[in-house]
C-alpha cells in the first residue's frame, strides 16, 4: 500500500494540527496558560523530529504517517515524564493567616471559603492532581494570580482588587468556569439563595465593594 508523498504529507500535517488543537482545547478547559502549551508543544515536536532523525526510514525518505505517529507518541511520553522534574508548581505552601475581612457572619465566611478560598487565601487545599505537571502549573498560576489580586487571608495589608469582590459576585465571573468543570469543586457551586445572602453580606463588609456597585 504505497501512497503518493503529497497524501502522506497531508496526513502528517493533519496529525500535527490535531495535536495542537487537542493541546489548546485541553488548556482552555483546565485554565492552563497558553504560554505553557506553546512550550509543551515545542518539546513534543522537537523530540518527535529528533526521533525521526535518529531512526531514518530505510526504504524511502518520505515521512510515513505510521512512523510519524510513533515518533509523536514518543515525544508526548518523554515530555510528560521529563516535565515532572520541573519544580514550578510543586510548592504547596500556605503562608500564615495575618488578617481577614470583618465578616458579617460565620455563614458568610463559610460561603467565601467554599467558593473563593481555593485561590484567594492562605488556606488552599491542594488536590492530589496538583502534584502532576502540567496540571500543577495551571493550579499554581491560578493561586499565585488569585492571591496577588486579593488574598482574604492577608487582609491586614492592602489588597489591590478587594473592592471588586461584590462586582465579581454580581457578574458571576468568579469562581472561574474551569474551577467547577468536570464535576470538580462542587462545594464552590453556591445555590441562588446562598449567592443572594453572600451578596448582601459582602455589601455590608468593609473593603469588599466600592461606591459604584
Ligand atoms: C480557581 C481559582 C479561583 C477561584 C476559586 C476564585 N478566583 Fe478570583 N481570581 C482568580 C484569578 C486567576 C484571578 C485573576 C484573573 C482574572 O481576573 O480572571 C482572579 C481575580 C479575582 C478578582 C479581581 C478581578 C477584578 O476584576 O478586579 C476578584 C475580586 C476575585 N477574583 C474574587 C473572587 C471571589 C469573590 C471568589 C469566590 C466567589 C473567587 N475570586 C474565586 C482565581 C480564582
Image (cartoon, grey):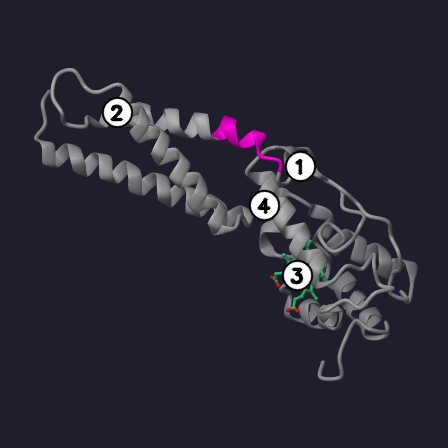
Instruction: Locate residue 19: give its quadrant.
Output: top left
Sequence-first disc among 2 and 1: 2
Sequence-first disc among 3 and 4: 4
Sequence-first disc among 2 and 4: 2
Q: Ligand 1 shows up in which quadrant of the image?
A: bottom right
Say left or right for 10 vs 17.
Answer: left
- The region drawn magenta spans 80-87
Q: Which mark is residue 17?
A: none
Q: Farthest top residue?
A: 58
Secondary structure state at the residue bearing disc 1 = loop
Q: Which mark is residue 90?
A: 1
Tally the numbered discs: 4
Sequence-first disc among 3 and 1: 1
Which residue is at the front of the view, 176 or 130? 130
Main SS of the magenta part reads helix
Q: Which mark is residue 53?
A: 2
Q: Residue at x 12, y 16 (%)?
A: 59
Sequence-first disc among 4 and 1: 1
Reading the image, the residue beneath label 4 is 138
Say left or right for 193 vs 90.
Answer: right
Q: Farthest bottom residue?
A: 212
- Screen quadrant of the C terminus: bottom right
Q: Is mark 3 within 8 Å of ligand 1?
A: yes
Task: Tell me if residue 84 is in the magenta stretch.
Answer: yes
| Disc 3 and disc 4 in contact, CB within 8 angstroms | no
- Screen quadrant of the N terminus: top left
Q: Mark 3 or 2, which is nearer the eye? A: 2
Q: Residue at x 81, y 67 (%)?
A: 197
Badge 3 density bin: few <14, some 14–19, many ≥20, Cα 10 Å: some
Distance from disc 3 to disc 1, alpha carbons, whole Å, reads 25 Å
Sequence-first disc among 3 and 2: 2
Amino acid at each position: 500500500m504505497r501512497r503518493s508523498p503529497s497524501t502522506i504529507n497531508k496526513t502528517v500535517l493533519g496529525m500535527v494540527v490535531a495535536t495542537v488543537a487537542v493541546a489548546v482545547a485541553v488548556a482552555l478547559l483546565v485554565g492552563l496558560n497558553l504560554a505553557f502549551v506553546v512550550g509543551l508543544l515545542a518539546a513534543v515536536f522537537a523530540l518527535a523530529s529528533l526521533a525521526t532523525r535518529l531512526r531514518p526510514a530505510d526504504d524511502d525518505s518520505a515521512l510515513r504517517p505510521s512512523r510519524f505517529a510513533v515518533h509523536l507518541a514518543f515525544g508526548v511520553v518523554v515530555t510528560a515524564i521529563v516535565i515532572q522534574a520541573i519544580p514550578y508548581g510543586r510548592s504547596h505552601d500556605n503562608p500564615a493567616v495575618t488578617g481577614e475581612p470583618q465578616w458579617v457572619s460565620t455563614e458568610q465566611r463559610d460561603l467565601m471559603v467554599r467558593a473563593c478560598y481555593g485561590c484567594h487565601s492562605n488556606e488552599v487545599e491542594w488536590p492530589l492532581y496538583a502534584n502532576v505537571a502540567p496540571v500543577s502549573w495551571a493550579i499554581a498560576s491560578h493561586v499565585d494570580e488569585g492571591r496577588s489580586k486579593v488574598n482574604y487571608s492577608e487582609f491586614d495589608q492592602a489588597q489591590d482588587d478587594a473592592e471588586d469582590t461584590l462586582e465579581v459576585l454580581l457578574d458571576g465571573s468568579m469562581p472561574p468556569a474551569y474551577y467547577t468543570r468536570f464535576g470538580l469543586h462542587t462545594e464552590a457551586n453556591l445555590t441562588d439563595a446562598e449567592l443572594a445572602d453572600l451578596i448582601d453580606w459582602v455589601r455590608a463588609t468593609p473593603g469588599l465593594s466600592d461606591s459604584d456597585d
